[in-house]
Amino acid sequence: MRIVLGPSPTGPTGTWWALPAPDSEAGPARDAGPSGEPGPGTPLAQVPYAQLAGLVDALPGRLGLTPGSVRWVLASAADELEGWLRAGVTVDRLHDLSLAQRLLLTAATAPDSGVRHTPVVPLPVVEPAVEDPAARRGPDQDAIFDLPDAGPSTPDALTLLRELQAQDAAVAGSRHPARLRLLVAAESQGALVAAQMRHAGLPWRRDVHEALLTERLGPRPPEGARPARLQEVAEQVGRDLGAPGLNPDSQKDLLRALRGAGVTVDSTRQWELQAWAARGGAEAERRAALIAGVLEYKALQRLWTANGWHWLDTWVREGRFHPTYLVGGVVTGRWAAHGGGAMQVPVAVRDAVRADPGALLTVADASQVEPRILAAMAQDTALAAAAATEDLYRTVAEQGRSAGTALDDRSRAKVALLGAMYGSTTGDSAALLPHLRRLYPAALGLLERAAATGEAGGQVSTWLGRWSPPPGQAWQDAVADRSTAEAEARAGAQRRAAGRFTRNFVVQGTAAEWALCWMGSIRRRLRAAGLSTVLVFFVHDEVVLHGPAAEAAAVERIVRDAAGEAGRLLFGDAPVGFPLTVAQVESYAEAK
DNA sequence: AAAGAATGCGCC
DNA sequence: AGGGCGCATTCTTT
């Protein structure tokens, strides 16, 4: 049973209703009458906003339902759940109307989706304000992660019920209703996982982080000054390049100094500097010595500015890093994050991520997800055979070797496959493309059709039905401009860029759906098993859990079983495996 | 002075 | 001229 929560349309301000809504799981929505109007909506309960969390806890029992059988329908989970979690309330299932609406509205822009949705009420996905926790340091520590009170601005419960029914109907009319229904459920479950992860936070040891900074940079400098070690390297670089007083932070000045010293590069990017050194032949060693200081400066400067003392002060509170995750924040469906660069915690500081005493971190990394997804989506039997093995790239290389192609070692197989999924047009990966096409015609066909659709200005969809956005006016103008040879070339480049985007979208987006299902399953299984281990971190195809060491064996099993379940949810019995690398460690740095 | 663009690096 | 991001800094424009 679904229960819609929203402000009461008739009661006093600040009073909320819990409204019953029939399930849609069994099939197309049948609960809307011919006019599409819901019934009068007799509320199951009515409480002040402040007591909402208590209601969520108590209502299923009062109705004789198991808590797990209720799907709570909210305007926006991101606005509500932090309060619930602080009150100690968690739920099993959710329907987030704002996330679902965004999926449906994007789908509705694509003629092939079958989706038509006119919102009953607009529910834009609001990005939680990125507040600087340091700015709110004070006696009221608990208020640090307070969210704005969602109560007053939320549409009333009856309106939300009508929106839910309109969404049910839109899903039912889509090309693959069962898949889209799964996507809506998974996206909503993602909101649940995201809120819980932010609430729990990633365990972060300030003392370890500080020791690491001091070792590499020197003691913490006064405000406005470079750390001692960084200053030394800056001065050394100035001397090496014959440019005393050089500020290596200025790319312009640095580039001029480099060129003055005979380093013929067009930018100061490290890969270009390294490539220049490697071109040196007999002089390689002298060249490497010349740029060594520059590279060291860049690495230290990065550590200092991105993850230094200021970062620690800003983002780590009471031993936890609490980033805000944005579910579906990337067009492909991947998550984005705000606050502290959560999705790119650099290897250099991972040692500061430590389990509490008596606890362990479980770091689970899904291997080679995207080519496996591709095999399953395309139903490419040969690639699926490789995807049934632990090391897909190695198996691809074996298949390539027995077929007598140049695709005969693991690293070439990897480069070729990644290149095919990203739309590479140059270098080794492009050269290997014909071999790949011969070995895996179905998989390459899928990618090339997706690319062709994008080049023509069309839209593509993931396996579960997340659609790529329609090209904007600027793109259409650029593509239509044939006025000059330059414009024509620009138009071609724009088309190819769109093709690379749609080509990658189908794979990256479906991989994101797999990850959503994986995490949802992990969370559900942890709760069902009554474990206290929780998810604390997520990056695209890797999760980190934190909990008592005694639960470690059970947690590893759950994480692996959940990966299998995610594969079956998306692809049924397709013979594609999703193997994991699982490390159970005290320090994140020990994983991998 | 503020806002936006460009550059560069980190992650998957 | 290989996809997707966030963030810090410098440079440029308003």
Image (spheres, coloured by chain):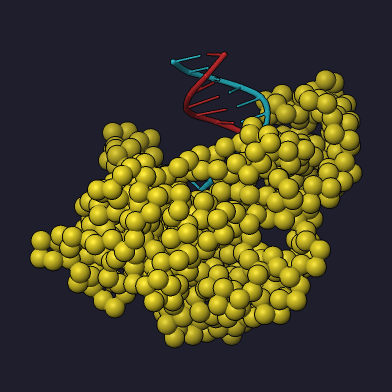
Chain colours: A yellow, B red, C cyan
A150 vs B11: above or below: above
Residue A548: percent from the left, percent from the top? 73, 70
Res. A535 image quadrant: bottom right
The N terminus of chain A is located in which quarter? bottom left
Residue at 67%, 80% (x, y): give it. Answer: A554
**Residue A185, percent across and down?**
40, 67
For residue A360, which quarter of the picture?
Answer: bottom right
* Residue located at (76% from left, 62% from top): A355
Left or right, A162 with respect to A95, comes to left
* Rendered position, C3 above or below A258: below
The image quarter containing residue A273 is: top right
What's the residue at 77%, 38% (across, down)? A309
Can you say whether A50 is above or below B3 in the image? below
Q: Position of residue A334 (x, y in %)?
A: 49, 57
Q: Position of residue C1 (x, y in %)?
A: 51, 48
- Residue occupying image coordinates x 49% and y 75%: A566
Residue situated in front as seen by the camera: A545 or A32 = A32
Residue A167 appears in view: no
Q: Quadrant of the C terminus of chain A?
A: bottom right
Number of labels in the image equals 0
Q: Nearer the viewer, residue A344 or A430?
A: A344
